[in-house]
Image (cartoon, rainbow, N blue to C red):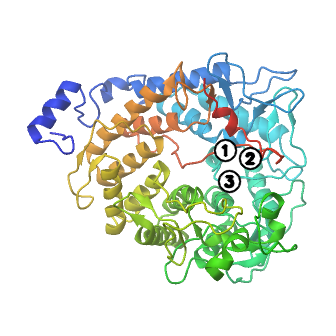
């Protein structure tokens, strides 16, 4: 099989690939499937990808477990200093806290379980299971809700939750509920039910809040009455889709793992609220389906900063933009900024995953069709193939390119240009999954084709059946992009995509594997154990070896911890991992 470098003549391309050692024949030049398997049918360390992940996991088990304070638990620190091995600490002006946020370790749990699945060595799964059990035994409230997520973590120095009184919050964390259920089904069921109990403020209209209160008495949950509200009703909550997607995942987990039909009904109902709030003419949006109830009146003129951006003043986009743009100016109708990475990246990846799990059911068809229609609308109205970006706009399709913000507020200073959004690896993964599950949607495929060209990944051709001409000299090392390519390989069965995935995997090893750990770059000081790169490489190994279904997939889950806002803004552990030498 001759595999071409895009843009080169056939003979020249083949010669270059041979000379560079880049010619791939599907299962890869450095990998022999039969020799790589042990007597149990699992894989030994026969490839550089598996070896790297194995090394990473061994180092995490050696240097990432709790050895601090009087109690040495089976929990993991969130990360360490690459040179000293010291754990990541939260500076609080007194005794720094050693961060262990189980909500920010879910990719790591996928890696540990996946590595055991592929190698047959159960020590990795066992370590993950011990952490799950400890969290359930010692780090839940009275209702079974875990202390984890955006505003909670355990300090391993004294095993206390140092943000007592702060709310429960999951936003695009996408926990590994299947494994948690395997470890302790009773506690997982209780936790998932407690999560819905804490975050739904008014069941009759599904008024969801991203923040959930701890230690609430369990109410009647799924037995509540529901009255379909109008989109963008005024509510007490903030119905952000980054929190809503985690809630939908939780409900679907109760159905998939515990056969809870009522949970499934409410999970589908929740996603439907976002769909119903999409613009009726374009099908675009939405990031939220309600607006916060205004209890204080903001000033009619002047900048809207600090406390004036708080929810008690009502919808922040309305306050900042309504004078110029009218009724369309609502937070839910905003289509610019990093929120698009969730609305058309992280969230659809999860929704398509759930649809795939529910394939053949009415619920699965609804989730699939709603997600596909949303993605199709976005690429139709917002994507510019010439610039390979998504134009900033409102959900009514009004293009904001070239315009500036008329007033200072939550979204930026007066005079700030509305900026386009460049596709991320996660957004490309959403499109790739959509192409796969739609069996090659022409409009989505054409956008993927354009993005591949723009990213210099090669020419996909007219449809899934076309033999592509791919660029095996790409320097891309994005794990989301790697998994997107694997998704196309899954859809096409064309080995050329596997070869391209291997090249991206090689780049990840070159750019991000240092001192036995995966890290943002060799210039960064701190290793984040939840980095998705080792999971992407495990998925690559799975595809190369034909061990389909062994590795729990990368679903764009991500966790971080925020502190209380102060005069210098809101502190976050993100600041720690951004530090460089």
How many numbered circles does the render carry?
A: 3
Residue position for label 1: 559
Residue located 60% across and 79% down the image: 276
For marks 1 and 2, give the CA distance: 7 Å
Of callouts 1 and 2, the N-terminal one: 2
Whether residue 39 appears in this view of the structure is no
Of callouts 3 and 2, the N-terminal one: 2
Residue 436: image location, x then y, percent: 38, 59
Which image quadrant: the N terminus?
A: top left
Residue position for label 3: 171
Residue position for label 2: 149
Whether residue 21 appears in this view of the structure is yes
Mark 3: secondary structure: loop
Residue located 25% across and 30% down the image: 22
Q: Is residue 490 left or right of residue 345?
A: left
Mark 1: secondary structure: loop
């Amino acid at each position: 099989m001759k595999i071409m470098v895009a843009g080169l003549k056939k003979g020249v391309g083949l010669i270059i690939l041979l000379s560079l050692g880049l010619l791939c024949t599907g299962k890869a030049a450095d990998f022999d499937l039969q020799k790589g398997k042990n007597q149990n049918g699992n894989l030994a360390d026969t490839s550089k990808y598996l070896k790297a992940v194995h090394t990473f996991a061994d180092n995490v088990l050696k240097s990432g477990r709790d050895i601090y304070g009087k109690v040495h638990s089976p929990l993991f620190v969130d990360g360490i200093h690459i040179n000293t091995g010291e754990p990541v600490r939260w500076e609080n002006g007194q005794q720094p806290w050693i961060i262990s946020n189980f909500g920010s370790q879910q990719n790591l749990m996928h890696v540990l379980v996946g590595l055991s699945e592929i190698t047959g060595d159960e020590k990795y799964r066992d370590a993950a299971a011990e952490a799950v059990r400890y969290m359930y035994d010692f780090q839940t409230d009275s209702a079974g809700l875990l202390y984890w997520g955006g505003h909670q973590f355990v300090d391993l120095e004294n095993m206390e939750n140092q943000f007592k009184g702060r709310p429960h919050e999951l936003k695009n964390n996408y926990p590994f509920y299947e494994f948690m259920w395997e470890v302790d089904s009773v506690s997982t069921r209780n936790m998932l039910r407690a999560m819905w109990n804490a975050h739904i403020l008014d069941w009759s209209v599904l008024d969801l809040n991203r923040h959930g209160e701890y230690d609430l008495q369990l109410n009647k949950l799924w037995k509540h009455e529901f009255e379909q509200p109008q989109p963008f009703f005024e509510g007490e909550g903030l119905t952000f889709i980054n929190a809503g997607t985690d809630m939908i995942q939780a409900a679907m987990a109760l159905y998939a793992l515990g056969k809870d039909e009522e949970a499934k009904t409410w999970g589908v109902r929740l996603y439907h609220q976002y769909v119903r709030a999409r613009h009726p003419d374009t099908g675009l949006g939405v990031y939220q389906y309600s607006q916060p109830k205004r209890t204080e009146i903001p000033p009619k003129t002047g900048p809207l900063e600090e406390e004036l951006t708080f929810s008690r003043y009502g919808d922040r986009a309305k306050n900042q933009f309504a004078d110029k743009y009218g009724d369309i100016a609502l937070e839910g109708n905003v289509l610019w900024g990093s929120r698009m990475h969730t609305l058309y990246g992280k969230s659809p990846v999860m929704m398509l995953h759930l649809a795939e799990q529910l394939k053949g059911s009415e619920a699965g068809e609804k989730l699939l069709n709603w997600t596909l229609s949303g993605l199709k609308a976005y690429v139709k109205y917002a994507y510019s193939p010439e610039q390979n970006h998504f134009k900033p706009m409102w959900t009514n399709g009004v293009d904001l390119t070239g315009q500036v913000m008329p007033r200072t507020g939550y979204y930026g200073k007066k005079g700030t240009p509305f900026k386009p959004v460049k596709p991320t690896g996660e957004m490309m993964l959403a499109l790739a999954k959509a192409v796969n599950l739609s069996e090659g949607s022409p409009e989505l495929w054409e956008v993927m084709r354009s993005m591949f060209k723009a990213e210099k990944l090669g020419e996909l051709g007219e449809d899934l059946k076309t033999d592509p001409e791919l660029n095996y000299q790409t320097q891309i090392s994005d794990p989301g992009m790697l998994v997107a390519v694997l998704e196309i390989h899954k859809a096409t069965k064309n080995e050329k995509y596997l070869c391209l995935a291997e090249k991206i995997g090689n780049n990840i090893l070159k750019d991000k594997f240092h001192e036995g750990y995966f890290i943002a770059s060799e210039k960064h000081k701190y290793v984040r154990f939840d980095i998705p790169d080792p999971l992407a490489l495990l998925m690559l190994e799975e595809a190369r070896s034909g061990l389909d279904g062994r590795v729990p997939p990368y679903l764009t889950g991500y966790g971080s911890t925020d502190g209380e806002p102060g005069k210098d803004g809101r502190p976050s552990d993100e600041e720690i991992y951004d530090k460089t030498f």
